[in-house]
Image (cartoon, rainbow, N blue to C red):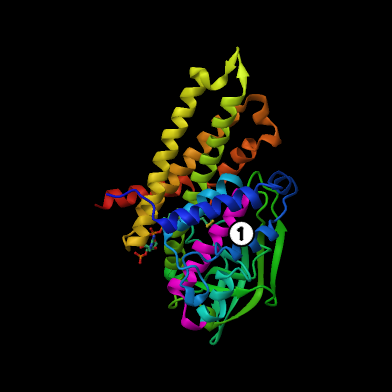
Amino acid sequence: MDFTLSEEQLMIQQAARDFAQNELLPGVIERDDAQKFPSEQVKKMAELGFMGMMVDPKYGGSGLDTISYALVMEELSKIDASASVIVSVNNSLVCWGLETFGSEVQKEKYLSRLSTGQCIGAFCLSEPEAGSDATSQKTTALDKGDHYIINGTKNWITNGNSAEIYLVIAQTDISKGHKGINALIVEKGTPGFEIGPKENKLGIRGSDTHSLIFNDVKVPKENRIGEDGFGFKFAMKTLAGGRIGIAAQALGIAAGAYEMALKYSKERKAFGTEISNHQAIAFKLADMHVQIEAARHLVYKAAWDKDQGNNYDLSSAMAKLYASQVAMDTTIEAVQIHGGNGFVKDYHVERMMRDAKITQIYEGTSEIQKIVISRSILKN
Ligand code: COS
């Protein structure tokens, strides 16, 4: 067994670390406060190849492995989880889904634009009444011969307004249940497709989250991904990979908060000594360190499974479940170690605590991960 990262992986990790320090850290508090989308930073991440990391270079991607992608997600998330979720959705849900299941025509038309960051994408599954219960799609895509007509509403869509290409999951034939669901590529500006209001969120406030409204939106049949009725499986398979990205995001939030707490504990004095010399603080740091390292192993293992061609439904669910819990626990403790300073914005950790929460919710709540995990272990 070899836990060593390759030269290339170390280089990419360092590039992401430098980028996060130099380009994401300045203004991160203000962007969170104002709910400002990091447009300039996204352009620069595209220049670094971070928007289509695993995509084949023939479609404009960086051709890297999933471990490299997880490393980048971790480093970006140490500083700015709003920026990293934009990267995660574009890479794992949109680019990967299109490259793996899209037709050659779709890849040529859309993938290069997405992987080079000329535009970004959104993945549209959740609805007012279909988040965890993803088969209950109320949005319809009725088959009209050479095109579909979409009607309905999608909720909590990351990159909701900033995206230009949307992968929309909708029900074509209700009598077939989940086998009657399709995934369709919808371009911004298609008549009848409207962007709803922006959500005012607890965390990841720099990313733009919107509802989307479809009123008789006409989409050509060549925009369907895969065979008729493949939409639900498309969503499930794509989300399994997406969960590796979110697990890496959670890991990064935890590691970032831990690094700040560690530094602060060596500077701040109480009772005549640095607070790290008090066992109450030192033991917190020890617990955080162990949990983060355990989360890291689960995340890298899931990424490795994907790179090896192994089934990664179970490993990605375990990585997301555990890393998101560690993100929550660690950021709460980081605020505690910072004391009064932890409660004010200048010290970053309160933002990280708010950002951590969503990692237990999006791309499958922790409860959904437990369904996936328990079904997997019980069927064997
Ligand atoms: N890969 C491929 N196929 C999968 C799959 C996967 N990872 N998971 C499920 N499927 C298939 C099943 O094999 C089944 O197909 P068949 O009927 O042909 O066997 C089909 O999908 C339906 O699966 P299942 O019966 O398990 O569906 P359930 O309604 O019980 O739901 C869960 C399964 C809960 C796991 C699913 O709905 C889910 O992941 N929900 C959360 C969705 C989510 O992440 N929402 C967040 C929105 S994105 S921010």
User: At which x and y percent is residue 78?
Assistant: 56, 45
Question: Residue at the location (67% across, 66% down)?
Answer: 213
Please tell me whether residue 256 is drawn above or below residue 304 in the rendered image: above
Magenta region, mostly helix, strand or loop?
helix
Amino acid type, mark 1: Ile
- Report whether 219 appears left or right of 316: right
User: At which x and y percent is residue 305?
Assistant: 34, 57
User: At which x and y percent is residue 319?
Assistant: 41, 47
- Report whether 152 appears left or right of 52: right
Q: How many marks?
A: 1
Residue 374 makes an appearance in the image: yes
Q: Residue furthest bottom?
A: 146
Please tell me whether residue 293 is drawn above or below residue 66 in the rendered image: above
- Report whether 296 appears left or right of 193: left
Question: Residue at the location (66% across, 60% down)?
Answer: 211
**Residue in front for this viewpoint, 376 or 262:** 262
Residue 80 counted in the magenta span:
no
Residue 83 counted in the magenta span:
yes
Q: Pointer 1: residues within 10 angstroms few (<14), some, or many (20+)?
A: many
User: At which x and y percent is residue 200?
Assistant: 70, 49
Residue 243 makes an appearance in the image: no
**Residue in front for this viewpoint, 249 or 200:** 249
Residue that numbered label 1 is attached to:
157
Q: Which residues are magenta?
A: 81-105
Helix, strand or loop under label 1: strand
Question: Residue at the location (65% across, 76% down)?
Answer: 216
Q: Residue furthest left?
A: 380
